[in-house]
Amino acid sequence: MSDFRLQVFAAVARHLSLTKAAQELFISQPAVTKHLHELEKQHGQRLLERRGNRIALTEAGRLLLGHAEAVAASAQQLDDQLLALRDPDEAAGRLRLGASTTLSQYVLPGLLPAFQARYPNVRLTLLNANSERIADALLRNELDLGFVEGRTKSRDLHYELLLPDELVAVRRAHPRGTPPAPLSLAEALAHPLVLRERGSGTLEVLEFALSELKTKLSSLQVAFYFDNTEAIKAYLEAAPGALGFVSRRALARELSAGLLEIVPVQGLHLPRQFEAVWVQGQPLIRPAQRFLAFAHAHFHAGA
């Protein structure tokens, strides 16, 4: 960004906090205030206003934020292009990834070190959020490439299969050590259920499968909704009698340690797909192209 004052203002606008902006930029809060005052003096308008104990953008502030974001994007594009000139066949520059919770916790981490070793000039960031939030971030140009699960598709986004997955019913392991007997759907759904939150691909897949079986999620006894799988597993370990639905890929440690067990549920099948996603009609930047190809090669080799 050509003007550091714009970077300061953008940080304040993101956090709506002078203190948090100062922490992000590693400068003092008085320095933040000085830069803001200089911008207001330059433009002859107030950019921020107090609302009780909070601050908000004025109309002039919202206009300036749009300009600051455009300047930052242009500067970043130039940096990426200049880095690419060093080696036209190499990937370089920033790559903003986003992945839904299961992918970011259990699938992608094992891939990242090898990619960084192969492409050391790519600056990676990874947003961990549910599938709905990842889609929104892509459409707001906050991410270059996303990875999601679930059934809902946006017409404004392009989806590409990465690898298959399956949700399974899981509970605290019984000490007897014999494989758990299959449960009927009615028996399974009579348990207190521990589920992912609204907006997650995991809950969406479960809800769709239940609707196919003429069962509404609202009719079930849900003990807790969590925003991550680790919390669900920890809850189940401490709650005999509860039942959860999580990715089979998330259970390796707990199954081998005898902490949790998978329970077959008759007539309930929960296959799903992990997919790469980006904005429809928008070509992927070179680092994103390299990462996607690297991911396909990695998971194909491990199949």
Image (cartoon, helix red, strand yellow):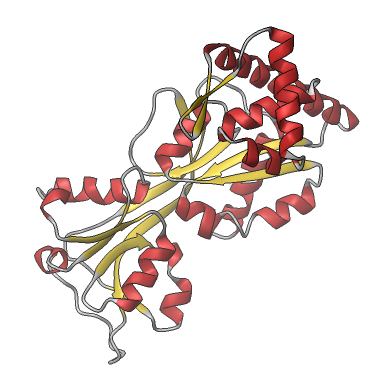
Extreme residue toward the top, this view? 44
Query: Can residue 77 be seen by looking at this rendering?
Result: no
- Compare residues 6 and 147 and report the one nearer the observer: 6
Position in image of residue 53 (x %, y %): 49, 35
256 w.r.t. 120: above or below: below
Position in image of residue 220 (x %, y %): 13, 57
- Residue at 55% across, 42% down: 98
In the picture, the quarter occupied by the N terminus is top right
Query: Can residue 44 be seen by looking at this rendering?
Result: yes
- Residue at 70% across, 29% down: 33
- Residue at 39% across, 54% down: 227
Q: Is residue 206 left or right of residue 248?
A: left
- Compare residues 60 and 40 and report the one nearer the observer: 40
Q: Is residue 138 left or right of residue 69?
A: left
Q: Is residue 32 left or right of residue 12?
A: right
Position in image of residue 119 (x %, y %): 78, 45
- Compare residues 78 and 110 and report the one nearer the observer: 78
Q: Is residue 263 left or right of residue 132?
A: left
Quarter occupied by residue 153: top left
- Residue at 50% across, 33% down: 54
